[in-house]
Amino acid sequence: MDAIIITIGDEILVGQTVDTNSAHIAKKLNLLGISIKEIVSISDTAPHIKKALDQAIDNCDFLILTGGLGPTNDDITKTVLTDYFEDELVMYPEILVRIKTYFERFNKPFLEVNALQAMLPKRAKIIENDLGTASGMWFKEKGCQILSLPGVPYEMKGLLEKFTAAISTEFEVGNFYHRTVQVIGIGESYFAQKLEDWEAKNRNEDISVSYLPSVGTLKLRLTGRLDQKEVIDERILYLINNYSKYVIGGEFETIEKVIGNLLVQGKKTLGTIESCTGGSIAKKIVSISGSSEFYLGSIVSYTNKLKEELVGVKKETLIANGAVSGPVVAEMAENGREKLGIDYCISVSGIAGPTGGTSEKPVGTVWIGIATPEKTHSKQFNFGLNRERNIQASVLAALNFLRLILTDQYQPE
Amino acid sequence: MDAIIITIGDEILVGQTVDTNSAHIAKKLNLLGISIKEIVSISDTAPHIKKALDQAIDNCDFLILTGGLGPTNDDITKTVLTDYFEDELVMYPEILVRIKTYFERFNKPFLEVNALQAMLPKRAKIIENDLGTASGMWFKEKGCQILSLPGVPYEMKGLLEKFTAAISTEFEVGNFYHRTVQVIGIGESYFAQKLEDWEAKNRNEDISVSYLPSVGTLKLRLTGRLDQKEVIDERILYLINNYSKYVIGGEFETIEKVIGNLLVQGKKTLGTIESCTGGSIAKKIVSISGSSEFYLGSIVSYTNKLKEELVGVKKETLIANGAVSGPVVAEMAENGREKLGIDYCISVSGIAGPTGGTSEKPVGTVWIGIATPEKTHSKQFNFGLNRERNIQASVLAALNFLRLILTDQYQPE
């Protein structure tokens, strides 16, 4: 079974909005064994929408549309679909009540335009939206299931969840299988070189190998037929067992979750003292729900003055070595353990750019420290010239540094 | 003139990668007056790529392809294009030198697979990549300019920059005009209600009005013909002048830049004391290059213990009101001004969820404080049930709260 995703809205075509919905939808449908043939973004005009419907409906089992269901005049998807499927808009009283309740909950006045959100196509199956006012609409035509969802991501997600629950019991699922591992701390070509034989073995058996690099991390995916599940599982297990220094887990694993689990298991606590990353490591840790079990707090000492006064780094250390140095991150991490009352402290000081670099310490030079109950480690990294990328790479390198220490895999060079 | 964007790679179709490239490309081409007709994501197989080329080349002036140019075996775009355009791969010695230098710079060993990156189609125009090993390839066919770029975003961006510089002098630009304002602190339907007459006036003149909501913010865009530039500029100016409480600026404005500019102009400094946002406000501020001019540092006091010990919130205040309360964020902000030695301090304490809510203070309850040299303000906000969204909405609300105070537009309710 396969699907096409169509996102409707000029905001995507003019580049104002990044389409995050399609990736989410693709992932969820893939879990059901439904493969995505194509993702198309079109403008929100009736002729474009109708043409895209014409082209897609005959070519897939599921057609997922997002966007254009808001309360303002530029939102036309609902009327275009109603017209296309020769349906008519009628008032759904129970939806109206739900929308009114929604506004009451947030103490917001109910506008007339919001009531129109309860006017929906008569013959479509309506999926109620618990997080907003635009309902999902499910049409069926020529054996194709057509689902129209709002473009606001969290509303879309809730509605898609209900749809996938419904179709997973109603329809037969697909016949391919894929698994992914998350890799950190090694570049694409270096890891590929290590895996030459492993890769050839997969290719010979028609199992495809894909490398998906992004800043500081890499995903490696195997795809084969469903009847190859066992051999794919075994190949993945091989990577996990033999490359645990780099492979942190499966598709949905993240370095922050790995660290969280290690700390919670060991009943240990964590905090950070950050300079150039400016709170980004803290933010990443706090993004995990349940982080309060192991994460206590942080200090962002962006200036040398705060490094001294708040963190207690010695003036002499700063003068002798500069803020971006091994001795400074070591003191930051050690003092951080004490000030924050934590077991493990990560510290970072670097030159994120675009300015501040010197010939000795160019933009992208970053020192990371880790203080543990036993020892303090520090290490220099060299990233690139781009500020955003340097911050992102520093965050991942710092968390991975801690992971290697927590799992006894860190070897000082 | 118009363009089609094709992204190549299963990683997008299986939902592992969010396609951020297309939005960036669309934005850049739009600035040149080139409108995007369609964005299509396809899988990385030769038949799919060739079919997509067949369909697109006759239908647009510019065709931008991204993805599939890496050094590993799953990257096939280069060979497929060379085949499609009946070209041949030859070694470009100057590119080889460049790639070798790239590896030397980062002290990384040079692998044979990396040398293959210098084998490129003979008749294509090669665009050199300053940030990686995959070159851009520019083909011309039937009046269509076809550009193939790597999928890694920062590499793609650098190459696109060179391409747009070249085409902006070579080709005539388009004939439409659009402008956008960024809106914060008011919901889509409420703002639309205020703008009913303004919107009707635009519609009557064939200027389209689009609302693009996302968590905590809204973009409002006007699109018309190039000869309507003056009237569109005037309509935008009207919004800026009459709704400055909500409208923070144009297309590329961000709340953190607005605040940065206000503080730098007034020679004032800023810091944050964060609880539930866990460093996210600090991270957003530090993302601006030049933030060290006004931003000094932060404390993330995730636990009550650190709120007391490190920030100096009184135990009595915590016991009497709970950590998520007006008096606590007021003390956090006031003490933060002192501890961090700053003029303005933002403080946040809330229940991000999914756990920790009570009937009195449900998940999504967030208190934000702002201490200024004159006064301390505090305000309660109620967001929703989703952790990620609550953190994001809190960050924007906190920064907007400060903006209203800095611009004398804050009115306590």
Image: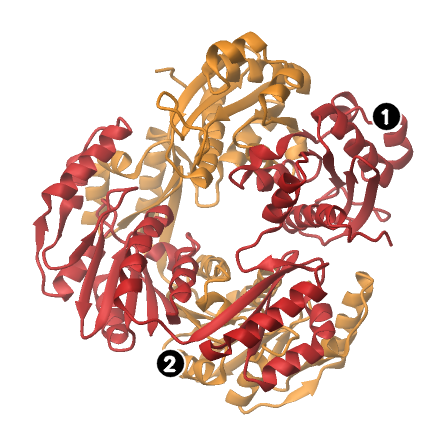
Chain colours: A orange, B red
Residue B152 shows in this picture: yes
Q: Choose mark 2 or mark 1, whichever is in front.
A: 1
Q: Position of residue A193 (x, y in %)?
A: 22, 35
Question: Residue A52's quadrant in the figure?
Answer: bottom left
* Residue A55 disc label: 2
Q: Position of residue A381 (x, y in %)?
A: 39, 25
- Residue toward you, B130 or B59: B130
From the viewer's perspective, is A61 left or right of B166?
right
In the rendered image of this protein, does residue A338 appear above or below residue A224?
above
**Going 48% across and 9% down the picture, which residue do you hit?**
A320
Q: Amino acid at mark 2?
A: Gln
State how far apart marks 2 and 1 are (Cα): 66 Å
Q: Amino acid at mark 1?
A: Lys
Residue at horizontal 24 percent and vertical 65 percent from the top: B146
State the residue in front, A309 or B63.
A309
Instruction: Judge by depth and name the residue closer to the eye, B135 or A21.
Output: B135
For disc 2, the chain is A
Q: Circles 2 and 1: CB distance less than 8 Å? A: no
Q: Residues within 10 Å of mark 2 (few under 14, many from 20)?
A: few
Q: Quadrant of the N terminus of chain A?
A: bottom left
Give residue B314's mark: 1
**Is residue A8 visible to us here?**
no
Question: SS for tag 1?
Answer: loop
Relative image position of residue B50 (x, y in whole percent): 21, 68
Please say if A169 is above or below A48: above
Instruction: Pick the quarter of the image with the C terminus of chain A.
Output: top left
Give the letter of the chain under mark 1: B
The answer to whether residue B58 is left or right of residue B186 is left
Q: Are marks 2 and 1 on the same chain?
A: no
Category of crowding for the residue at label 1, using alpha-carbon neighbours closer than 10 angstroms: few (below 14), some (14–19), many (at least 20): some
Q: Where in the figure is residue B268, as x and y percent of width and height?
A: 68, 35
